[in-house]
């Protein structure tokens, strides 16, 4: 429950950073406001109370089923008086299984775009990408890391080529400069459009070297 609460608070902060809107956090479950009794629901309710103590001003409610969290008519019926039900913009799944299944369903069936993965809860922004990532994956995660590090130093993981294969190493970058290296494609990404950033806002510091991923794409 403690971990789930901290995830909720961290994700609310990410919502504000990435989208520029206040989070309305729904703690998801297969139950809404006591409609079912189970230890899994109890965990969500305990996490809710912890999250309220960690962030007293946060708009958060639970336990809520997904339809009650997202659809106003269902929210009004199942959770009358809730400030979040039917208006949630941040969904906290009760465990890794549910979260992984949920995002893959909306990505593959509904055509949603999955951006990430995003690491939260560390002292400084650090994100990682798989060796099979696309150029757009690199750009999106670089943009995310820049937003996370808006008031400090961000750390962007780049993929490096070597004679024995691909290896990952981290390169320090700052928010004030993530521009020159990814400017030709950053302005076209969904995050750039979402936040209204132009190409001139960012640069990518590769410590004196070109990123092989972008270089191979002719960028």
Image (tube, rainbow, N blue to C red):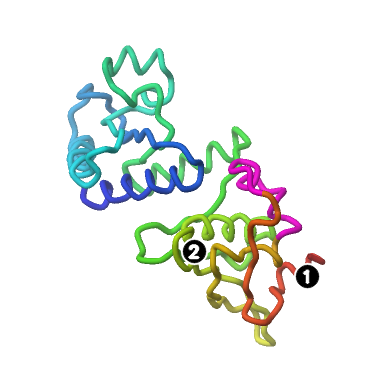
Instruction: Determine whether the residue tagged by mark 2 lies in a helix, strand or loop.
Output: strand
Q: Nearer the viewer, residue 158 or 67?
A: 158
Q: Is residue 178 left or right of residue 28?
A: right
Q: Nearer the viewer, residue 154 or 151?
A: 151
Residue at 27 percent of width and 27 percent of height = 31
Residue 79 in percent (x, y) is at 28, 18
Residue that mark 1 sits on: 216
Residue 35 in percent (x, y) is at 23, 21
Magenta residues (range): 183-197
Vertical order, 36 against 93 (above or below): above
Q: Is residue 5 left or right of residue 123?
A: left
Residue at 70 percent of width and 62 percent of height = 182
Precedes in sequence: disc 1 or disc 2: 2
Residue 151 in percent (x, y) is at 45, 60
Q: Tell whether position 11 is magenta.
A: no
Residue that mark 2 sits on: 127
Residue at 67 percent of width and 84 percent of height = 162
Q: Quadrant of the C terminus?
A: bottom right
Residue at 54 percent of width and 59 percent of height = 146
Residue 112 in percent (x, y) is at 60, 38
């Amino acid at each position: 429950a403690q971990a789930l609460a901290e995830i909720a608070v961290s994700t609310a902060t990410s919502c504000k950073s990435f989208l520029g809107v206040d989070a309305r956090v729904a703690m998801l479950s297969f139950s809404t406001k006591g409609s079912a009794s189970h230890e899994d629901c109890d965990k969500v309710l305990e996490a809710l109370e912890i999250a309220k103590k960690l962030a007293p001003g946060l708009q958060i409610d639970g336990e809520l089923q997904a339809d009650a969290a997202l659809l106003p008519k269902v929210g009004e019926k199942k959770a009358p008086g809730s400030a979040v039900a039917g208006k949630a913009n941040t969904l906290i799944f009760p465990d890794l299984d549910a979260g992984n299944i949920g995002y893959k369903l909306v990505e593959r069936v509904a055509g949603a775009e999955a951006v990430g993965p995003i690491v939260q809860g560390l002292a400084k922004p650090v994100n990682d990408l798989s060796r099979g990532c696309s150029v757009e994956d690199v750009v999106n995660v670089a943009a995310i890391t820049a937003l996370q590090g808006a008031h400090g130093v961000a750390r962007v993981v780049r993929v490096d080529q070597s004679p024995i294969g691909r290896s990952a190493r981290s390169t320090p970058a700052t928010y004030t400069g993530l521009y020159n290296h990814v400017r030709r494609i950053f302005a076209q990404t969904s995050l750039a459009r979402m936040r209204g950033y132009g190409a001139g806002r960012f640069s990518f510091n590769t410590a004196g070297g070109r990123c092989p991923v972008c270089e191979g794409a002719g960028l």
